[in-house]
Amino acid sequence: MAAAEKTGSWDPALVRTRAKAADGGWQLTGEKWYVPSADTAGTLFVVARTVGGPSLYLVQHDAPGITIESLDSIDPTRPLARVGFEDTPATLIGREGAGGLIMNRTVDRAATVLAAEQMGLVDRALKCLSEVLPAATDSESWRGYTRKLAELELLRACATALWYRAVKHQGGDDPNAASVAAAMAHIGCSNAVRQVALRLTSVAPDLDATVVDTITTRARYTDLLLGGPALSHERLLERLGV
């Protein structure tokens, strides 16, 4: 899915890539940023603007006029790319002007799935912490450890509730409620995974460095994906009419 541009925003109003009718089909000109796994994808779904508004197009990986440039990524196992288009042949998917709706729905569902991955990271981190219990040299140090662990468990419980709510609403009939729930899940789960990653070594200084690095790297990546919590706050306020 190639939707965001250099700003990193998934807001349909900020799409600048253009589509024009040509030879009974369409051609795209512009660029998309932070496209996941673009170098290995056989086809790309691209959101581009026409006079009718943002629309969705299908573009073949080897189409004329397409260029793919790998970008630096926080997590090397999740490659991102910049994709350029210069009069690149494309096929319109669905109705012209419906790309904004598709983009919004995609963000809602992707944010919900991303929240699930973040909760998996939190679960993994807390499991690792429970496996390296500190030596109980005195009751005060033991109380300090359990207090820190309890704070992280509370973060997990709150974020899990937001994720469950988002899953429930994604299958419902109210798109606005689904957007609100997805935005809240992204905000809450991003906060949880960020806080847990930051506190790993302070809770358990002897935790394996490789485990810490893996969890921290993936936590930062998921925190920033889809525009990060800042975009979710904007979407939440917009849906609430603020």
Image (cartoon, grey):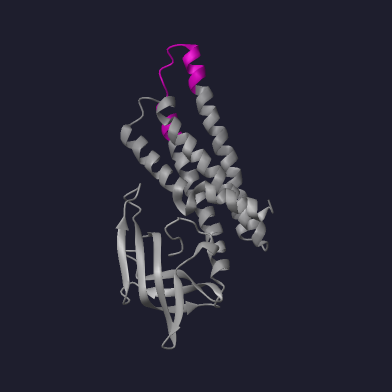
In the foreground, 234 or 51: 51
- x, y percent for residue 144: 50, 19
In the foreground, 238 or 145: 238
Can residue 131 be seen? no
Q: Which residues are magenta?
A: 126-145
The magenta stretch spans residue 146: no
Residue at left 45%, top 56%? 7
- x, y percent for residue 231: 54, 51
Residue at left 41%, top 33%? 128
Q: Is residue 70 left or right of residue 215?
A: left
- Classify 114 as above or below 38: above
Residue at left 44%, top 26%? 203
Q: How many marks?
A: 0
Q: Which image quadrant for residue 101?
A: bottom right
Q: Is residue 190 left or right of residue 184?
A: left
Residue at left 59%, top 51%? 234
- x, y percent for residue 150: 54, 28
The magenta stretch spans residue 128: yes
- Classify 81 as above or below 229: below
- x, y percent for residue 221: 41, 47
Can residue 171 be seen? yes
- Classify 6 as above or below 98: above
Q: Quadrant of the N terminus?
A: bottom left
Q: Main secondary structure of the magenta part?
A: helix
- Classify 125 as above or below 29: above
Residue farthest along the bottom direction in this orientation: 24
Q: Is residue 173 left or right of residue 79?
A: right
